[in-house]
Image (cartoon, rainbow, N blue to C red):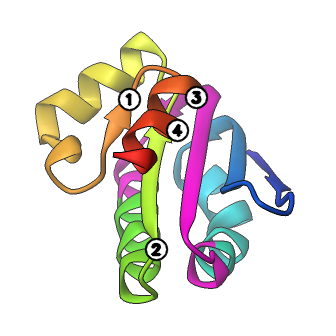
Amino acid sequence: MEMVVVDAAGAPKRLVLTGRLDAAGTEKVEVAFSAQMRAARDSALVDMTGVTFVGSLGIRMLISGARLADRGGCKAVIFGVQPAVAEVFRTIALDDLIPVVPDEAAALAHLAA
């Protein structure tokens, strides 16, 4: 699991996750992910187009990160979820806690709404 942070002036912070968000993958990025979500200014986009699997620890990391962002007055949106991951998110109703949209354009539209 890898995470790249794109933090351009005037744009939402974008956290690009790549790989498997299983126990080992979550351990690699969780501290940095949480710190980035806590430090997000107005909004944070979580780009999951490169994530092939999400386990329970990965789900916990995403929920905790969204809560950290929310406490700081920041909106968080997940986008680009692959079909197998989307099925897991639907099963646990993750979008009741964090907006999950198909692509970056939809994520930006959600933030603007």
- Name the residue type under label 3: Glu
Q: Which residue appears farthest toward the top when viewing the image? A: 83
Mark 4 and mark 3 residues within 8 Å of each other at the beta carbon = yes
Which one is earlier in the sequence, the residue at label 4 or at label 1? Answer: 1
- Name the residue type under label 4: Leu
Which image quarter: residue 37?
Answer: bottom right
Task: Establish if 28 lies above or below 37.
Answer: above
Assess whether residue 42 is covered by the magenta stretch: yes
Which secondary structure, mark 1? strand
Work out whether residue 58 or residue 23 is closer to the camera in this orientation and state it.
Answer: 58
Q: Residue 3's spot in the image, x, y percent?
A: 78, 51
Which one is earlier in the sequence, the residue at label 1 or at label 2? Answer: 2
Residue numbers of the magenta segment: 37-59
Which secondary structure, mark 2? loop
- Name the residue type under label 1: Val
According to the image, label 2 marks what residue?
Answer: 74
Which one is earlier in the sequence, the residue at label 4 or at label 2? Answer: 2
Q: Residues within 10 Å of mark 4 (few under 14, many from 20)?
A: some
Task: Establish if 108 lies above or below 102.
Answer: below
Q: Residue 93's spot in the image, x, y percent?
A: 13, 41
According to the image, label 1 marks what residue?
Answer: 101
Q: Residue 99's spot in the image, x, y percent?
A: 30, 45
Q: CA distance from mark 1 to mark 2?
A: 17 Å
Which secondary structure, mark 4? helix
Residue at image point 57% right, 83% down: 38
According to the image, label 4 marks what residue?
Answer: 108
